[in-house]
Amino acid sequence: MAPVPDPNNVGGGGGAKRDEATMKVPSKDPKKKDDKKEDDLSEEDLELKQNLELYVERVQDPNPELQKAALESMRQEIRASTSSMTSVPKPLKFLRPHYGTLKEFHQNMAESDLKKLLADILSVLALTMSAEGKRESLGYRLTGSGGDIGSWGHEYVRNLAGEIAEEYTMRQSEEASVEDLMDLVKQIVAFHMKHNAETEAVDLLMDVEDLDLLLAHVDRTNFRRTCNYLTSSAKFLAGPDDMLVLDIAYMIYIKFEEYPNALQIALFLDNMQYVKQIFTSCTDLLRKKQFCYMISRHGITVEIDPEMVADKDDRDMLQDIVNNTKLSEGYLTLARDIEVMEAKTPEDIYKAHLLDGRASSGPSVDSARQNLAATFVNAFVNAGFGQDKLMTVPSDAASGIAGNWLFKNKEHGKTSAAASLGMILLWDVDAGLTQLDKYFHSSDNPVLAGALLGVGINNCGIKSDCDPALALLGEYIDNEDSSVRIGAIMGLGIAYAGSQNDQIRSSLSPILNDAKAPLDVIAFAALSLGMIYVGSCNEEVAQSIIFALMDRSEAQLGDALTRFLPLGLGLLYLGKQESVEATAEVSKTFNEKIRKYCDMTLLSCAYAGTGNVLKVQDLLAQCGEHLEKGDIHQGPAVLGLAMVAMSEELGLDMAIRSLERVLQYGEQNIRRAVPLALGLLCISNPKVNVMDTLSRLSHDTDSEVAMSAIISLGLIGAGTNNARIAGMLRNLSSYYYKDASLLFCVRIAQGFVHMGKGLLTLSPFHSERLLLSPTALAGIVTLLHACLDMKSIILGKYHYVLYFLVLAMQPRMMLTVDENLKPISVPVRVGQAVDVVGQAGRPKTITGFQTHSTPVLLAAGERAELATDKYIPLSPILEGFIILKENPDYRDEE
Amino acid sequence: MLTVSVKWQKKVFEGIEIDVTLPPYVFKAQLYDLTGVPPERQKIMVKGGLLKDDADWSAIGVKDGQKLMMMGTADEIVKAPEKAIVFAEDLPEEEQATNLGYSAGLVNLGNTCYMNSTVQCLKSVPELKSALSNYSLAGRSNDVDQTSHMLTVATRELFGDLDRSVNAVSPTQFWMTLRKKFPQFSQLQNGMHMQQDAEECWTQLLYTLSQSLKAPASSEDSDAVKALFGVNLRSRVHCQESGEESSETESVYSLKCHISHEVNHLHEGLKHGLKGELEKTSPALGRTAVYLKESLIDSLPRYLTVQFVRFFWKRETNQKAKILRKVDYPLELDIFDLCSEDLRKKLEAPRQKLRDEEGKKLGLQPKSSSKDIDVKMTDAEAPSSNEGGESSTAGQQEGASSSSEKGTHMTGIYDLVTVLTHKGRSADSGHYVAWVKQESGKWIQYDDSHPSIQREEDITKLSGGGDWHMAYIIMYKARFVSM
């Protein structure tokens, strides 16, 4: 399709010009009149002017014949000259002085066709003459003859559209009929859609609240741009309008069989009905496989039923893809291609040799805390690679020093060490269970707890018919040792996040209301239930958690772990907006110690990722209050700010700026949360300005502010290998070499930055930042809430909450596979994504690209496109697994 | 009879028959044959849980052709190591200190930084420490007076405290005995103890230690301190007027680096310091005449101390004024050309050997690292050759030969180990700080109670020429070569 040149269709540019025109003309005209303007006019213009003046006179002539002729000629003149809008067309200019006379005459005319004709002309003249807010153009149009709206030119249509919107809101408030307007709207929409002005058509329809009209007018050439505009404007609309807009986009995509895009929207809407519809309407099995890849990336549980795919073998294959069973394979393909299979030790990450003079010479005695840090670093760095140099070394070397790394950790540290095995073998269930098996027979409770947790981590995002995690962990839920219980409960939470598994609920719910259960077990049970039922608004789970919260004694409410109860409750409503209201109402009856904390957590979870400005303001207001000592609810409020605002770029930048402000004026408990909020906003997306802020805060005199800043430095650089952050952390490691706690945080952050040797991302957003994976967000938010009280949780004995991050860990890759799902290598261009919403034609979608061959890594804000015509990708969003089909029209150049 | 497939690790065993009338234990035994995993270690996952040995197949509802998953290995079960691992966090506070890689600082008791820095510098000499630890009450000989004895004991205790403690040590006892022994350090000014000259403290302390650490049994020369720090100088005293010439030997504990206008570098200062004029009665002339005295080093100490003569008595202001001139000093000092002929001959062979070794390493690896390794090597051997501080006997020449028997030789090359700096405009004011190289190669700045890590390149920046800390007394450690 060749782009149609249309000077009027340049977004805001047209509007500005129109303003200019209306402003300039009145001021110039009288002056010109006085200055013997005839002299300035060319002969042609003079003639035109005289003609028009003649027509104006004749229109007022009593003879209808003459009148008609005059009107016709006037119309001719105007139509002939409205092609361009760079200046006010001459006929309009010359007719301006006569607008008043014509208007008056029109008023006195009897009803007739002639009156309608005159109304048409007046409607056009009103374009430049009508006073602001009078909507005369529209008024005359409605009384006019109707005719083809486009014949008067774009500018006229656009002006009319604006007046319609105004008129519509006015009539709405007066509850008057809008039928006549809607007729006009139909004409205008049809005109816009034909003339590459989809954005204006959509705007008008949104103003008159009748987007359904769009369906009739989209066609193959313009539906993409239309939908693009619809989906991106949805982010700025308040509910429920945004849902409506997306619904329309979905219907348009379905209409044109653009199923991948439709699926994207169905997932965004969390509408399983739509997902099913896509499967049933699409007949191509290969495309369905691609859908399954998209669903698996989103991390939700979908059962492929016979209605969706009839054949059983096909169904099994699709279910396998949805269950993510091939994720490990794909990830390892990527790792081998990039040649990063070689396991890394924590020392490779610390790079102490780069620190001149200050490098510690390696203490002669093992430090439990530093070993624990090394355990985590090792786990995060080698995540998913299946090999490392601490935990998976062959057993014959186990007699040596290297093999028994597990026992180089102290007590509860062993839990994290054993669980790290699950992380190293992430997604590879068969190998993971084999490796973890030996720890199941340990008589050491922390080791057993770690093995259970490891199974959960290992199975994160992977589903299987045999439900190995449930089978293995289920029997330990009621173990007498509470560390083993927590291991099993947390493992289930991670393995079944988002699955809404009833069997688990029935075994976990009783724990919540068990008067004998220790607080930490209850806290983790609530959290796991929140994860499993994330975003489900499940009443029963909510009830159990609410009762558990009400049963807590005053002392227990003060415990750091109690915060997991409201958080578990909040996760149930993650991103579900108004659905939270009933529960929020109940939370008002809680003990005042936890009430506000609960309030803030619920609010922030429910509106997470919506970009709702009103909620951002609510939360900011909370941060502005100066509190008496002891209140802790401002922490979640600050985090909530980030959760709500993180969805789109503009809101995100605004949130970063408001956080700077909060940092300056807020109290200590707020300052501690601000770095974490920044970390969430820019997760796996190291923005330089945020990096600088965090770097500054990492030297803060308040050690908790410094700790959260350090952890956040790790979060914003997670999986990027960002050299600048790595350098900063290295320097921090020598700066804090004497402070074990801060050093621990630095080490953890270093592990984050090099997570998966740079192949992973923690960003919960995917599919070009449109979709938000609920489980991923749940994992990050849980960690951040835990970080609000670093000393009692992460630096205490619950450091394994760090493993909740596994929920958000995803390879940041694009892997192309052929029709048999075997990886193939094709050239792709990878570059910075360009926002093309509302742009005419086919603008470039990436800039500053480099050509690589797949599999490739995609950094934050990058987009890929195929650099060959040999294949056709089955999804327009080139992320994760992409199935390529051979292009039948492709001709080799030879 | 049901047929199922079982997935174990990466393998799938197809077509395994289950006799539903027999307990699942039989099925497990079947799998034992296939996988070698003993039944009690097998975990078989069926819908909603693990397969129990005595379960009823019909209740489980396994269907024909179903895929089961089995987990289990025949691997050894992990056992905790027999010897429990000791973690730093569990150690008593004293032992944690050793982990830091350097010892604690000293509390300033009120203008005692001169003393603190001196103690920190001397403490870095392991041989001195071991000599002190051998010093006991019984070993006290009669010619050592009570106060010297007390000071020696106090030094030993203080060194011990420093090694054991994590937090800064308060050297109260040491200070008391020091003041008792040397009342000049008790001077008061405005009711406060005055700042003193660190050099004086250094010399006095070493002198005392040398007196008390003399081995009582053996001859008068078995002086541990002298063996460590003493430099024998052979001087030629020459009178130009009369042409008289005599030679004399003396033993000093430190070389002086005189600072004049021509001196820009330590080496020049040392040369300058070894030449001197003195007036004495000439027997030939029968009156006092000017004699030139030129000294050369006759034997080398294990630790070479150099004092920058930065202070002089300024009559006008009645105080010790300071020369701020910048005098560079190297991290590696070669004093070959300050040695006497005899000594040079002895040094030649070891030096050649050292050069060869370095050249060899240079061929293989960059220079900086080879140097480090070299230092470590000599470190490892040095203490053994000087056990108890009594191995070197009867003068330095013999000391050198005795060590040569054990295979290590002096090379005339020294590595910088401590720097005692002064900051301020006069000796009685300002601030003294010690900079000490640890065995790990790290430099630590001991600013009273605050030890902090420094970079090596910053150490040579203490050479003066401004108001920053500047070197006052520096100590080099001999580099040995084994033959």
Image: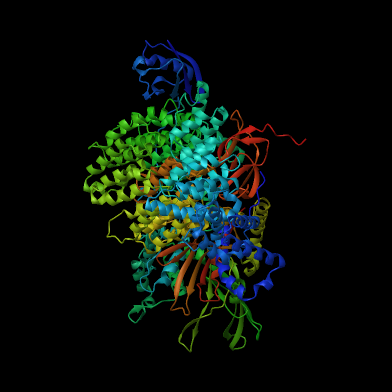
Colour convention: rainbow
Q: Is residue B383 visible?
A: no
- The mark tally for this picture is 0
Q: Nearer the viewer, residue A213 or B250?
A: A213
Q: Tell me which corner region of the image, top left, top right, bottom left or bottom right, holds residue A804.
A: top left
Relative placement, left or right, of A221 versus A489 is right
Residue B245 lies in quadrant? bottom right
Q: Is residue A334 above or below residue A732?
A: above
Residue A583, percent from left and from top: 29, 43
Residue farthest to the front? A63
Query: Is residue A726 or residue A715 the one in the foreground?
Result: A715
Find the residue positioned furthest to the right. Answer: A894
Q: Quadrant of the N terminus of chain B?
A: top left
Q: Position of residue A591 (x, y in %)?
A: 23, 49
Question: Horizontal and vertical percent for residue A881?
Answer: 56, 36
Q: Nearer the viewer, residue A105 or B374?
A: A105
Q: Is B336 situated above or below A564?
A: below
Q: Against B324, is A176 above or below?
A: above
Task: Name the residue located 57 percent from the left edge and 65 percent from the top edge.
Answer: A98
Q: Position of residue A624 (x, y in %)?
A: 34, 61
Instruction: Let me know if residue A596 appears in the view.
Output: yes
Position of A583 with respect to A231 (left or right) is: left
Residue at image coords 33%, 31%:
A476
